[in-house]
Structure formats: structure tokens, C-alpha cells
Amino acid sequence: MENTKKTSVWPLAKLVIILAAIAIITGGLLALINEVTKDTIAAQNEQKVKDALNAVLVAETYEPVDISAFAEDKTVTGAYVAKNGENVLGHCIEVAPNGFGGPISMIVGIDPNGAVTKVAIVNMSETSGIGTKTNDEGFLSQYSGHASEITASTKTTIGENEISAITGATVSSKAVTSGVNTALQVAQVLKGGNGNA
């Protein structure tokens, strides 16, 4: 009887050993691939940020600004002063509000009068064909010119400080709007002198 138990346990133990070996090999390969590609991915992300900065506010230089004053707001991930020579053209605020599929990394250009110039999405994981429509120029262009708090509206007629939310993507629309509102607040503080600009 004991011999039968020992024999029946061995196939299960063998399976566990094989699965453990596969998991270790797979984990090792993923770590290796991650190590090999991390510099390329970092360079691609850096280029996306540069392209977004240039898209929202064309300038010769973008000087990083200390954002430690906004440390409590995890949405704020960066800020830059856009300049041509010594002439300040405005601020570019990098924010990452939470959408339906996770953080939406975006950059908002703000002119010296505190109005949005443009908004550019850097990265997002929103639902394809629905939430990703927040990256369409037709949607993002609605923010340009706004200088005070904006609301994403599902109504047919929108008010002065409202933008039209994308049908079926209200969460994503509200997330982008929240990011723009945060950027407006940050730029206002920076313009007031609480920062390096």
C-alpha cells in the first residue's frame, strides 16, 4: 500500500518541478529582455516628452522647474518653463491623472496669461477605440484658450467653461479634464513665483 502512494506522488512532484523550472527560465528571460531594452524604452519615452513639449508650446528651450511644492499631488509629474532666449513663453506642465485604464500621461501648455495653448497625450492605456478618442485633436483642441476650471459635459449644449465629453468615454474625458485643471493650478502657482520661474 505504501509503495502505491509513493509511486502516485512522483508524477505530481515531477510536474511541479517542471513548472517551477519553466517559471524560473521565463522570469530570467523577461529580466534579460527588460535589461537589454530599458535604455531604448527610456530614450523613446524621453523623445515622446520632447515632442509633446514642442507640440503644446513651441520654444527654443524647456527648463525643468522644481515641483517639490506639489509633492502631495501625485498627478503632477513635471513642469518646464518654455523660453526663446530669456523671453518666457509660458509653462508646460506634465500631469498623469487616472483614467479608466490607468494613468494618462499628458503635457499641457499654458501661456503667460494663464490660458491653455494645447494639450498632448504622451502615454495612455485607455480602451482602444473608445477612451483612446481622448487623444484625437478634435477632443483635445477644446481645451485651448481656457484659463479657469473646466468641466467635461455630456450635454448637447455646453457652457463657457465646459468641453464635450466623448460618448462612452466619460471617465477618460473627465480624467483628461482633471489633468488640464491641475496643470492650470500649477501654472498659476509657478507664475506667482512659487517655483524656479
Image: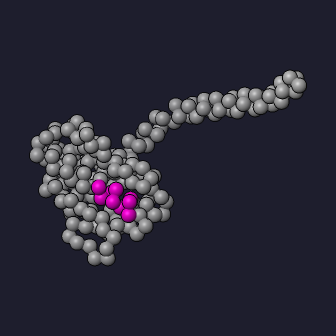
Image vertical order of residue 32 relative to residue 83, above or below = above
> Going by the picture, which residue comes out furthest to the bottom?
157
List x then y, in percent, for residue 98.
Answer: 37, 51
Camera sees residue 82 = yes
In the foreground, 4 or 73:
4
User: Where does the N terminus fall, quadrant-wise?
Assistant: top right
Residue 21: where, in percent of width, then height? 69, 29
Q: Does the magenta stretch mainly form a helix, a strand or a loop?
A: helix
In the image shown, does 22 or 81 lie closer to the viewer?
A: 22
Q: Is residue 152 magenta?
A: no
Q: How is the image coloured?
A: one colour
Give how far across and how far down residue 80 sits, in percent: 24, 43
Visible residue check, residue 62: no
Above or below residue 129? Residue 70 is: above
Image-quadrant location for residue 134: bottom left
State left or right for residue 6 relative to residue 142.
Answer: right
Q: Residue furthest left?
A: 192
Residue 26 appears left or right of 139: right
Point 39% across, 54% down: residue: 99
Count all numbered tags in the image, as a single digit: 0
Instruction: Write the residue at 23% across / 41% down.
Output: 70
Q: Position of residue 159 (x, y in %)?
A: 22, 72
Q: Residue furthest top?
A: 2
Position of 19 relative to 6 (above/below): below
What residue sits 44% from the left and 53% below the top? 101
- The range drawn in magenta is 170-178
At 68% across and 30% down in the image, what residue appears?
Answer: 20
Compared to residue 2, the image places residue 68 above or below, namely below
Depth check, front residue: 176 or 139: 176
Quadrant holding the C terminus: top left
